[in-house]
Image (cartoon, grey):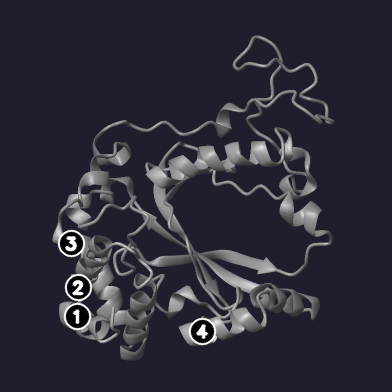
């Protein structure tokens, strides 16, 4: 996908957002389902070819930023349709699915897990001050609202910790006081963050620095993470190693190649791949990459990349 035309979208307005991570939606009874988010651009998708992308990046390196800024300044609302795929916990079995549902390199087939619309994502205002509203923003997948929780997705688990850890270093421990990171009337349901440099709010007043305690505290049990069984594929990483050494690892890539891409898009992918592989200094890495690509479509990749004088 990265080396195809999808790797060079025509700005930020004309690309879909495909959530690679798996989350959980949890109800008040503690029952949950696994979900994947999708954001479908109202303007549709448009891509540059490699030649067009090189030309645009040379003529206007800020093309994507300028295109989005100008559209919003002109009063246009940039909109994505928010959709979700849903998987019941007992369906998250790699032996039945043929793939690891928590592997970020895999998609959930839409014929098995159809997308359901649940809202919109709209951009309708540009930042008033770049430093205040952009450079100090601290997005993290660990920032969740009640009802949304993490899954056994290993990359998600990594990012939940290290994104926030890096932001503490970059911005400071009290980054939640910056307006862009604390929307108006937002509530913190499980606060255990006390003191630190530049703490200017009530610092939880008389709230004890541990939970639970015998005194007043703000921790809300109804927002605690829903319990789930630590067994089999539901939580363990048993499924994470299921695919190793199996031919099925390439089935989804083959479907993308043969069923989604046009012949011209396939040729562009081969050309883009060959041009960048030329910069690899080690023959063994080039050969390894080439062998992996051939498993997607042996004949086409052999002819096209060999013809690119790799």
Horizontal side of residue 128 vs 121, given as left or right: right
Q: Nearer the viewer, mark 3 or mark 2?
A: 2
Which label's residue is closer to the chain start, 1 or 3? 3
Callout 3 crowding tier (Cα within 10 Å): few <14, some 14–19, many ≥20? few
Q: What residue is shown with label 3?
A: 248
Dots 4, 2 in contact, CB < 8 A: no
Q: Are marks 3 and 4 in contact (CB under 8 Å)?
A: no
Cα separation, mark 1 vs mark 2, equals 7 Å
State the SS at label 4: loop
Report the front residue among 173 and 301: 301
Q: Position of residue 260 (x, y in %)?
A: 32, 80
Q: Give the label on residue 48, or none.
A: 4
Q: Quadrant of the N terminus?
A: bottom left
Looking at the image, is 191 positioned above or below residue 69? above
Label 2, on which residue? 294
Residue 17 visible in this rendered orientation of the protein: yes
């Amino acid at each position: 996908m990265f080396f195809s035309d999808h790797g060079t979208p025509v700005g930020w307005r004309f690309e879909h957002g495909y959530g690679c991570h798996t989350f959980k939606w949890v109800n008040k009874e503690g029952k949950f389902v696994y979900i994947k988010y999708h954001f479908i651009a109202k303007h549709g998708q448009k891509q540059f070819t490699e030649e067009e992308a090189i030309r645009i990046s040379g003529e206007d390196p800020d093309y994507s930023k300028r295109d989005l800024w100008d559209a919003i300044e002109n009063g246009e609302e940039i909109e994505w349709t928010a959709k979700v795929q849903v998987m019941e916990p007992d369906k998250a079995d790699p032996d039945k699915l043929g793939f690891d549902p928590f592997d970020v390199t895999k998609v959930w087939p839409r014929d098995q897990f159809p997308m359901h619309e649940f809202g919109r994502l709209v951009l309708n205002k540009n930042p008033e001050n770049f430093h205040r509203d952009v450079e100090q923003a601290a997005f993290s997948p660990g920032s969740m609202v009640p009802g949304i929780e993490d899954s056994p997705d290993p990359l998600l688990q990594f990012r939940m910790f290290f994104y926030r850890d890096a932001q503490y270093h970059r911005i400071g421990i009290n980054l939640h006081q910056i307006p862009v990171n604390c929307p108006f009337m937002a509530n913190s349901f499980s606060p255990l963050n006390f003191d630190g440099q530049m703490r200017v709010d009530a610092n939880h007043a008389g709230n004890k620095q541990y939970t639970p305690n015998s005194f007043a505290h703000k921790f809300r049990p109804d927002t605690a993470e829903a319990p789930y069984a630590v067994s089999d594929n539901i939580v363990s990483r048993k499924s994470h190693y299921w695919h190793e050494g199996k031919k099925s690892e390439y089935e989804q890539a083959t479907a993308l190649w043969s069923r989604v891409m046009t012949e011209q898009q396939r040729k562009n992918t081969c050309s883009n791949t060959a041009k960048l592989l030329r910069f690899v200094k080690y023959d063994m890495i080039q050969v390894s990459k080439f062998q992996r690509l051939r498993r997607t479509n042996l004949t086409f990749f052999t002819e096209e990349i060999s013809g690119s004088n790799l």
